Amino acid sequence: MRMLWLCLAMLCLVAACSKKSDQSADEAKTSPVIELANKAAAADSGSVLSPLLEAKGFSIVWIRRAPAQISGRRASTAVYRSADGARGGVLYMQRAKDEEGVTWHWYFADAAPDSVQVLEINGDGLWDARVFMSGGTQRDFIQGETFTFLTDRQARIAMNGAASAGDSWKAFDGDTATAWQTPTSGAFIEIPLPMGAGSGELSVRVASGSRASNLEIFAGDKMVQEVPLQGSNDFQRIPLDPELQQAPLIRLVVEGPAKTVAISELEIR
């Protein structure tokens, strides 16, 4: 009888521990702390971004708190889509005090994202991004290969537009020591503007040693503006033509007398 009571007591203890473990798992799924953080991220980012996106026919469908790459920042990710669900984008933001900075922005003209996960994919100690698309597909982006979170920006342009060749993302990484370098023949880079052109000022910085001398700016297939590039490494600020400011995407054609051209930074505000 004594052994029977001992066995019953042990079974009750195991059951209690199991129940506690199950409760902890359930609580983790609906943690009030995580829920509050996500709501705060939505309030911070949504209040700034929603009006810009809605004016262009997009709406935010998903916002979550995310790990920050830069210390002392609060980071969040947001997903937006067009009304027909055919297009959309992903934003990664790092907030310092009251300033909302869009660190990186992917735009997809051929698909609509559902959500994004910031995680380490290749074990190099930097956060990468995995975008889950409607329809069940996913796209992985490796930091240091196609983008960076180690930048402090406030521009809202998309940074994954097409380019003639080379690491075009280095023109948007906030680091003047790196550059997008490409053969001069047919050199171009596209900048999607799903949130508009802001104040409509294009900033260009030619890389050291580059002999890029001229910039043609297109809206679609139409050249709207041509600007000679100054022969220095200072930022050249170019007010965009109103037609370009209304375009969903602009195309920059870079010309020069050498075999290659290099642009260290591009920005539109």
Image (cartoon, helix red, strand yellow):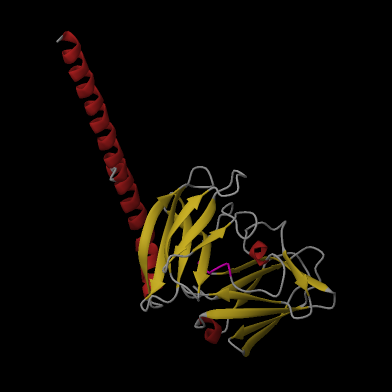
Residue at far left of view: 1
Residue beneath the point at 44% across and 75% down = 87
Residue 185 in the image: state x and y as whole percent. 79, 80
Camera-side residue of 113 and 236: 113
When asked about the image quadrant of residue 133, the answer is: bottom left
For residue 101, say whether it is visible.
Answer: no
Residue 211 in the image: state x and y as whole percent. 81, 72
Query: Total marks drawn?
Result: 0
Indicate whether 221 appears above or below 146: below
Q: Is residue 265 left or right of residue 13?
A: right
Residue 242 in the image: state x and y as whole percent. 53, 85
Residue 60 in the image: state x and y as whole percent. 36, 66
Q: Is residue 149 left or right of residue 33?
A: right
**Image quadrant where one finds the N terminus:** top left
Part of the protein shown in magenta: 156-160
Q: Is residue 132 left or right of residue 54?
A: right
When asked about the image quadrant of residue 5, the answer is: top left
Q: Is residue 59 left or right of residue 122?
A: left
| Majority secondary structure of magenta residues | loop
Q: Is residue 70 magenta?
A: no
Indicate whether 184 appears above or below 92: below
Q: Is residue 159 magenta?
A: yes
For residue 237, say whether it is visible.
Answer: yes
Indicate whether 257 appears above or below 147: below
Residue at far front of view: 1
Camera-side residue of 169 and 214: 169
Residue at far bottom of view: 222
Residue at far top of view: 2
Residue beneath the point at 79% across and 63% down = 208
Residue beneath the point at 52% across and 64% down = 105
